[in-house]
């Protein structure tokens, strides 16, 4: 049971991590044309960095950590240059050149990220289902 | 996880069962105590499931966390019911024994 619950915990952490990825991809899509932010300049695309969890645990030190979860190490901003579009009528256009700086978000790429994260979420749900079925079968031994 | 508590229950040792039920061995980790801990585990996991569902309803928690907590509670309860069934069955078997 201990191992199985650790496995469910690991899958649960992966579900939370994938949910974060989906949220970040969604906010990138939502802000695909935000030209004004609190820091000035257009919205910068954000990315999620994932890292294995429990790397410093007691079991890991003994080399016995079987189920290792995942956690969000951080959400970083993409340093790619902004897109520039000529639109003199835009309120945020450069008064001299007439160029508008748009976020460095590529909606197609974000959709791919979004679907990837959604599929990964489904994969982890399937893993939880496998463990749930194993436990249910083991309990049937008593019947 | 709270289910881990069950792992330490040492149910499979016949010596413990007799000690626990007869209460002859002072402070021994007997079967009655094991059953007590199992019920504590059920209460604990049910409480955790309750918290997770409340968190989810308050928009602080995730749906999957709530479902996993609910499943833990359900599994612990099923395990307890199975062990209780086995215990009652063993008792009835002994009571039916012709002397």
Image: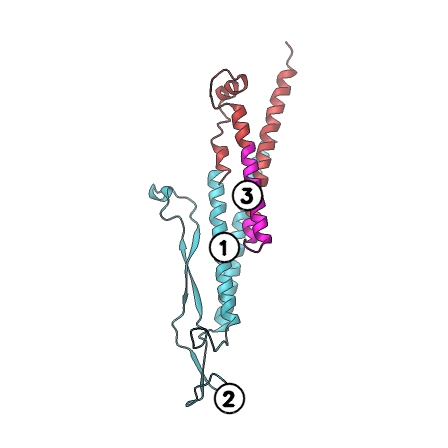
Left/right placement of residue B19 relative to residue B94 reads left
Q: Where is the C terminus of chain B found, in terms of image quarters?
A: top right
Q: Which residues are magenta?
A: B39-66
Dot 1: element: helix
Tell me how far mark 1 sits from mark 2, CA to CA: 43 Å
Identify which residue is drawn at 59% across, 49% down: B54
Q: Give the chain coloured red.
A: B
Residue A84 painted magenta: no
Q: Looking at this rendering, what residue extends furthest in the left direction?
A: A61
User: What residue is pinned by disc 3?
Assistant: B48
Instruction: State the hue of chain A.
Output: cyan
Q: Secondary structure at mark 3?
A: helix
Read off the residue under disc 2: A89
Question: Is the residue B94 above or below the residue A74 in the image?
Answer: above
- For disc 1, the chain is A
**Magenta includes B53?**
yes
Q: Residues within 10 Å of mark 2 (few under 14, many from 20)?
A: few
Circle 3 packing at 10 Å, graded few (<14), some (14-19), many (20+), is: some
Examine the rendered structure and indicate whether residue A6 appears above or below residue A119.
above
* Residue at figure coordinates x 64%, y 16% from the top left: B95
Image x and y of residue A12, in percent:
50, 50
Tell me whether the residue at label 3 lies in contact with that at label 2, contact meaning CB atoms closer than 8 angstroms. Answer: no
Residue B81, picture quadrant: top right
- Using the image, name the chain to which the residue with label 2 belongs: A
The residue labelled by disc 1 is: A16
**Which labelled disc corresponds to residue B89?**
none
Residue A88 x/y as whole percent: 48, 89
Residue located at (50% from left, 55% from top): A16
| Residues beneath discs 1 and 2 located on the same chain | yes
Q: Position of residue A92 (x, y in %)?
A: 47, 83
B50 sits to left or right of A50: right
Disc 1 residue crowd, few under 14, some 14–19, many 20+, Cα 10 Å:
many
């Amino acid at each position: 049971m201990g191992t199985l619950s650790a496995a469910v915990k690991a899958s649960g952490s992966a579900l939370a991590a994938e949910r974060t990825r989906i949220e970040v991809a969604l906010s990138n899509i939502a802000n695909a044309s935000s030209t004004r932010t609190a820091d000035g300049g257009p919205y910068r695309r954000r990315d999620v960095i994932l890292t294995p969890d429990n790397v410093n645990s007691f079991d890991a030190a003994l080399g016995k950590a079987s189920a290792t979860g995942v956690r969000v190490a951080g959400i970083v901003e993409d340093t790619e240059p902004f897109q520039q579009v000529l639109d003199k009528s835009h309120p945020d256009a450069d008064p001299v050149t007439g160029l508008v700086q748009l976020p460095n978000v590529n909606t197609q790429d974000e959709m791919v990220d979004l679907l990837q994260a959604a599929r990964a979420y489904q994969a982890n749900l399937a893993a939880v289902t496998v463990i749930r079925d194993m436990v249910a079968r083991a309990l049937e031994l008593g019947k | 996880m709270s289910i881990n508590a069950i792992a330490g229950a040492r149910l499979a040792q016949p010596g413990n069962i007799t000690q626990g039920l007869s209460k002859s061995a002072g402070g021994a980790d007997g079967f009655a105590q094991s059953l007590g801990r199992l019920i504590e585990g059920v209460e604990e996991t049910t409480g955790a499931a309750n918290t997770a569902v409340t968190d989810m309803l308050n928009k602080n928690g995730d749906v999957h966390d709530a479902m996993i907590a609910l499943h833990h509670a359900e599994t612990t309860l099923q395990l307890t019911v199975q062990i209780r069934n086995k215990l009652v069955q063993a008792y009835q078997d002994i009571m039916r024994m012709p002397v």
